[in-house]
Amino acid sequence: MAKNESKILIFGGTGYIGSYMVKASIKLGHPTYVFSRPDSDKTELLNDFQSMGAIIVKGRLEEIDKLVSLLKEVDVVISVLAYPQVLDQLNIIKAIKIAGNIKRFLPSDFGVEEDRVSVLPPFEAFLEKKKKIRRAIEKENIPYTFVSANCLGAYFVNYLLRPYDKEKQEITVYGTGEAKAVLNYEEDIGVYTIKVATDPRALNRVVIYRPETNIISQLELISLWEKKTGKMFNKVHVPEEEIVTLSQSLPDPDNIPVSILHSVFVEGVTMNFDLGEDDIEASALYPDLKFTTVDELLDIFLHDDPPKPYNAAFE
């Protein structure tokens, strides 16, 4: 194995953002292991990973002995498990502690910086589970990198602009549309995450993905899209009060997405705190590596095969 290579094990690699992590790990030359349930229906994707060179390992998170045996074969662990499985990471932590050889663990964060935001109760309950995992990692003295990747760019372009609906004349705007958010292309999130996972500078640190080129408001995003498509859209604003009421009245887990929309696109939580001296901003780590700008991301949506819409799992 080359000096700069690490054996990387990825949990949740067949999920939406997980697949980008797997491809990035392989692309960057790391021996890549993908942990998958024995009954996974993602056979085609797993076969694709295997054809790229990934090693597929079937098992369940409650099989601690099997996890320990697998962990002893790798150096770095990345969890990209979906929200319903966040607390299952306690099994991974237990196995990492027993194995005793893991150089870095990246838990399933990859959204807002949960230790530094104030959000509506349904989203707060969502983040509390992720905080519990962070605290467990710290308590067990497991070497870590916590990643705040902010908004998944293609996911939210699809959600906010609905570019796949060619007949659409209206675009929903949450609140005033002026709050700033950070939209990062999923391919970049994959590459940067694999880079920081093996970077000594990111050991036991929080890394925040906040490149200047990707900070944008809803209204600016819509304006940019109008210029690129030559269309003008009717902007339908949903008042903040209505969003808050929905977060209180919708049943769980339907109240989570609307609370996320409020936090990110009304309150602007990805941008409403300053980065301090101890913070690491990802784009500053690698001057030769550039994030896809929001402008460039929208160009991708003008192609014949743009990123497809996806719905996150909340139950």
Image (cartoon, rainbow, N blue to C red):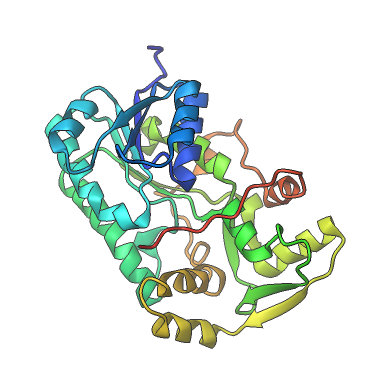
Can residue 28 be seen here? The reply is no
Give above or below for 300 relative to 273.
above
**Which residue lies at the image location 24% right of the left edge and 54% below the top edge?**
87
**Which residue lies at the image location 68% right of the left edge and 63% below the top edge?**
161
Q: In which quarter of the image is the C terminus?
A: bottom left
**Which residue lies at the image location 83% right of the left edge and 58% below the top edge?**
229
Give above or below for 212 relative to 256.
above
**291 or 28: which is nearer to us?**
28
**Which residue lies at the image location 31% right of the left edge and 29% below the top edge?**
57
| x and y percentages locating residue 145 in the rendered image | 34, 42
Give the number of callouts.
0
Can residue 219 be seen here? The reply is yes
Is 195 positioned to the left or the right of 106 in the image?
Answer: right
Give above or below for 51 relative to 14.
above
**284 or 15: which is nearer to us?**
15
Give above or below for 3 relative to 238.
above
Q: In which quarter of the image is the N terminus?
A: top left
- Residue at the far right in the pictured view: 230
Q: Quadrant of residue 106?
A: top left
Is 122 positioned to the left or the right of 282 in the image?
Answer: left
| x and y percentages locating residue 189 in the rendered image | 52, 43
| x and y percentages locating residue 59 in the rendered image | 25, 35
**166 or 126: which is nearer to us?**
166
- Residue at the far top in the pictured view: 1
| x and y percentages locating residue 152 in the rendered image | 54, 53
Is 104 positioned to the left or the right of 174 in the image?
Answer: left
